[in-house]
Amino acid sequence: MIVDGEHTFSGPRETVWGLLQDPEVLAKAMPGARQLTLTEDGAYKGVIRIGVGPVTAAEWSLNVKLSDVVHPQSYVMNVESKGALGFTRGSATVNLDEVDEGTRMRYHADLAVGGKVAGVGQRLLDQVAKMLTRQGLDALNKELEARLAASEPA
Amino acid sequence: MNRGHVGQSPPRNEDHRLLTGNALFVDDVHLEGMLHVAFVRSDYAHAILHGVDTSAALERPGVVAVITAEMLGDYWQPGPLLVPPPPVEGLIFNQASQVPLAKDRLRHVGEAIAMVLAESRYIAEDAAADVIVDAEPLEVAVDLEAALLPDAPVLHPQLGTNLAAHVVQKHGDYDKAIEGAELVINRRFHYDRGAAAAMENRAVVARWDVRAEELTVWDTTQAPIPIRNGLARMLGLLESQVRVVAPFVGGGFGPKIMMFYPEEVLVPWAAIRLGRPVKWVEDRQENFFATTQERSQIHHAEMALSRDGRILGIRDFFWHDTGAYDPYGLTVPINSQCTLLGPYDVPAYHSEFRAVFTNRTTVTPVRGAGRQHGVFVMERLLDIAARELGLSPQEIRRRNYLRSDVFPHTFQILFQDFAPLYYDSGNYAPALEAALDIVGRHTFRAEQEAARAEGRFIGMGIVSYVEGTGIGPYEGARVTIEPSGRVRVATGLGTQGQGHYTAFAQIVAEVLDVNVGDVNVVTGDTREFGWGTGTFASRGAVVAGSACHESATIVRRKVLEVGARVLGSTVDEVELHHGTVRVTADPSRAIGFGQLAGHANPLRGAVIPGTEPGLEATAYFGPDHGSTASGVHAMVVEVDPETAIVRIDRYIVVHDCGKLINPVIVAGQVQGGVAHGIGNAFYEQLIYDEGGQLLNASFADYLLPTALDVPRVEMAHRETAAPLNPLGLKGVGEAGCIPTGAAFAQAIEDALPHLALEIREIPLSPSRLFELLQAAGPAAARPVIADESAIAAD
């Protein structure tokens, strides 16, 4: 499954970068995330709960390792997620560019989805991925606004 | 009076039980203390299995055991090779049959990894989700042609290749044939996978009776006796200690043959091990992954013809997808190879195939069992050649049919029964003419023109096929007249809706001159009858039916002998009449069968030396060859060129399965087969992604044709008796679904003559057909079809 797109944040690149690397923020931005922690070796480990169509919401372990990190421009997320209903594996490339309106994020994920969720939920996967992405970006936008507001002189 | 004898259609003996909900299916078996099973299955198409952690599952209340491969000890063995490869010279066959539970490698999504036994299915399912599988994904081999390339990942490292088999069979000299050819057609054809989609999924219940030391297994198998024999061997029991019951089964269609599926060998093992009855009933989703499937093949086929449309020779190279394992040997590709020849005179044939392991569910026969592919290739080649030569599809077939005086006809290639492909009898051309009469040979083209004038596109497809049926080795039957006067028939077959309880009863009722309702048939219980093979290859009626006839004939003789003795007469002077023996010259001197059964089993006196007690006989029947059924299918479709929706207006089958035992049952088999064929041609397709994941594993996404999509088939029966058995029977179980794809393709092309559309793949779907229509340019000017009036010309 390919998930790609772009989104422009109204904020400086350094702030957006920090946001995207903060497990607490990511946990908020990730729909269904139960917990997300940054381990000592730089990987994010967590548990999320997501349902796809007829596949009821179930817990998935999440393991994300970053590689090819070019601060504050780009990184690759190597994603592995497993649960009783299947698995997701693959990688996502994230690029941040400075643009007039702020920071443009381009993302491209190539994910293999397997198990029950692939067999039964296939028809809905794209829509679910789009919906989760939109919810995630909304949450990131809010968090960014909050951070920018907090950093402004009162 | 309609006594329901052979050739009539009495009400079916089994219908009362089925319609009142009193028929026993495996899931109806409830036993005290029964445990329920859920399986942990692979999410990966190909992976190394590092470990299975069952600790969390075992802690769940209500879980009794979680079984992994290691715990099976010596019982962990790959399944048997069910059908060895035929003795073809130079044949390569690499065996890799399925294992009870994956041990170190996962080879397809849905492969069983662990078995959870719990007090209820709910608990078992929840506990299965607790099991942690440590697997390392590998690259997959799912593309049939790419799987044999040198860099492809290999499923079975011990083989070092994904090649499951390589077989070359030749008849005549193709190289010479092509030298003299005036037209050569060469195309690539693709036939893809579908599911059998039986209404009832698989199910197994097992009980170990420790006092009787007897294992009883209720199993949705088509072949209870081979399963009994195999389980006894694997479990170290006597065959007499194992009873396998295949009760009513909601559709077999091939995948329920004697597969020794993991679930089938594990449930009995667990019942003995744990000392409690065990039940597993497959759910629909498991069925999509864990029940065998059929039919991905890619053919590169060439036909050499003379200018007048006669076939000089055919050369075909094909790839056959056998999935992750190949326990059923080469039956499917051999059937494709042999059935391709169809009802035609093919002087030279070179056929070569490679069976290929792929990371997909194992392939074994599904209704049609490879015949579809062969028929599709042959019929498409004929259609394409006809177009090139300016002949109608009907005329090119007429010119190539085997004549009715050539039978028996033998091709020098081996069929699935290991004997040279042998057509016992046939009469093909009249079936085509009969089908054209039903379509309306004098009116159809005019109707088509009139529709076109209204902007509607209708087309006709008309195709031929043969079906090798009724193969050996043998079946048996025991016929007993009981003291009640009723007749009991036991045979070793399993039954899955074919009407065996009636058809076998009709055969026996006719021989013994009783009502069909007075004949009680039991099938599928190894305690009732312990010798036999199974229900497959459209062989039940032919082989077991002939055994019933044989036993009934012996019982008839006994009845006449005992009757004559009791009536103080001689065998020549008595006759059977409606369940009695009577003196022909004086019908008032008669005795009923029930009373006679008492005389044959006396309580006092002595049985006459040299005779046996009872009015009972057991007999076996094994035909030298399978008998060859044949037929013509025609369909009229209307195609919407904008939406690519195809509506089937009419479906016509002219079928020849020899002597009809029961015309309504035959019609039901054909109608059901056509529904299967329509599904296979236009609705059903198992779609795998490049990672080997099945993407449509539910009936929400895997489309079956509904009652609205399947017209009532217009049928005509022809009866060319088979010389190979006493009643002249041929099989009919698969006929309805074999040529449907070929008929679809021709009909759609016929509906859209303005497009250069050439259909070389099945299944189609509205969306796939839409793509083909988009890609098709306008048709080039075609040769004028000289005999177009001659759909009419006889």
Image (cartoon, coloured by chain):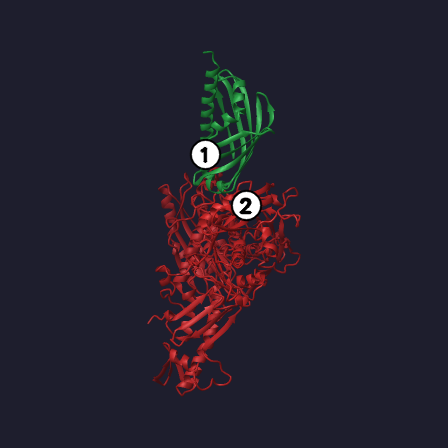
Chain colours: A green, B red
From the image, which quarter does the N terminus of chain B lie in?
bottom left
Q: Does residue B372 lie above or below B150 as drawn?
A: below
Density class for disc 2 (Cα within 10 Å; few <14, some 14-19, many ≥20) is: few
| Residue receiving disc 2 | B55
Tell me the kind of residue under disc 1.
Val
- Which chain is indicated by disc 1? A
Place of residue B168 in the rendered image (x, y in percent of width and height, measured from the top left): 63, 55
Q: Does residue A16 lie above or below A114 as drawn?
A: above
- Residue B661 visible somewhere in the drawing: no
Place of residue B528 in the rendered image (x, y in percent of width and height, measured from the top left): 47, 68
- Which chain is indicated by disc 2? B
Label placed on residue B16: none
Tell me the kind of residue under disc 2.
Ser
For the image shown, how many numbered marks are present on the structure? 2
Contact (CB < 8 A) between labels 1 and 2? no
Q: Does residue B177 lie above or below A35 as drawn?
A: below
Label 2's element?
Answer: helix
Q: Quadrant of residue B231?
A: bottom right
Place of residue A134 in the rendered image (x, y in percent of width and height, measured from the top left): 45, 28
From the image, which quarter does the C terminus of chain B lie in?
bottom left
| Residue receiving disc 1 | A128
Density class for disc 1 (Cα within 10 Å; few <14, some 14-19, many ≥20) is: some
Query: Relative to the observer, which residue lies in front, B793 or B632?
Result: B632
Name the residue at 46% across, 86% down: B606
Query: Relative to the observer, which residue lies in front, B600 or B643?
Result: B600
Label 1's element?
Answer: helix
- Residue B713 visible somewhere in the drawing: yes
Question: Mark 1 or mark 2: which is in front?
Answer: 2
